[in-house]
Amino acid sequence: MSNSDSIGFFDSGVGGLTIWKEVVKLLPMENTIYLADSLNAPYGEKSPEEVLDLCFRSVDFLISKGAKLIVVACNTATTQAIGKMRSTYSIPFIGIEPAVKPAALKSKTKCIGVLATNGTIESDHFNRTKEHYSNDVKVVTQVGEGLVRAIEDGEIGTVQLRTILSKHLQVLMSEPIDYIVLGCTHYPLLIPMIRDIVGDSIQLIDPGPSIALQTQRMLNGHGISNSNLSMGRHHLFSSGNVDVLESIVKNTLKVKASNISYSSLYQSE
Ligand code: DGL
């Protein structure tokens, strides 16, 4: 392995790009490979066994492309499979789980909302975290049913998506919450819409910036940071619709750079 190898990312689709963007911003010299497994989204509706199998396939693909570290840019995959991935492969992994801790510690109303997929909310991993804080804060959960699918279908900004989102947020807002934890990496793509619906008095927790810092620490800790002084190259793959992937990067995340290439997973094999 060489330090100029890539940081690998995968998600059930385009959601993990919200993490990828923050990592690229913080570590612009690093090369990256991103796999959007959009063909199999949403993971939140699949059994833990199916999610595990899909995770192994994504990891094998990223390693075959030379990943030196993998960011599991998906809460559902992390909560259900990170332990098995860590014990199977020798490269380091970074996982993402709903950021209950910072919200719980900062909440003044002692009541926080978590919007996540069914797979995450039902997982033992998440329930242990929720239980840990349950003496101090009330954690109100809501499954963001329909949101991942709508984002994957390229529906950001549509009235239909806003209607679904608003219904989920009203459930959380019926309690005295002052924080909403975005417990699925697709949801930060909806921040302008969420802000519009919930107003300014509720804080949103987006895990991207803290995962980027954790990635930096882990690269340094393993001595595998890229010491090249040229800008990194980014290769983004989709097992589904590459146009949606490209549009999210350029139009939603507003990342426009010539060092990014886009491929269909199947054309590349
Ligand atoms: N972005 C994934 C997550 O963070 C979405 C999971 C899904 O496909 O349901 O959980």
Image (cartoon, grey):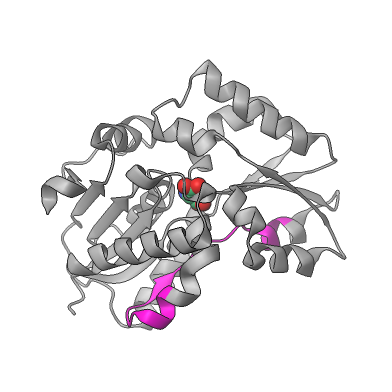
Q: Is residue 45 above or below residue 170?
A: below
Which quadrant holds the C terminus? Answer: bottom left
Looking at the image, residue 175 sits to the left or right of residue 37; the answer is right
Please name whichever residue, 186 or 249, is drawn nearer the observer in this view of the structure.
186
Q: Is residue 58 left or right of residue 102?
A: left
Q: Residue at x 84, y 58 (%)?
A: 137
Q: Quadrant of residue 32?
A: bottom left
Q: Which residues are magenta?
A: 85-103
Q: Nearer the viewer, residue 231 or 239?
A: 239
In the displayed structure, 58 sits above or below 256; it is below
- Tell me, yes or no, if residue 199 can be seen here: no
In percent of width and height, residue 186 lies at: 48, 43
Q: Quadrant of the N terminus?
A: bottom left
Residue 65 screen position, x and y as percent: 18, 64
Question: What residue do we see at 68% from left, 59% from top?
Answer: 100
- For the point 57% across and 61% down, which residue is it? 97
Q: Give how far across and how far down residue 6 sits, in percent.
A: 23, 65
Which residue occupies the foreground of this view, 217 or 139? 139
Q: Residue at x 28, y 78 (%)?
A: 224
Asked whether residue 58 is drawn in magenta, I would say no
* Number of numbered discs on residues: 0
Identify which residue, 180 or 128, lies in the foreground: 128
Q: Is residue 225 visible?
A: yes
Residue 45: give x, y in percent of width and height: 53, 47
Let me know if residue 86 is in the magenta part: yes
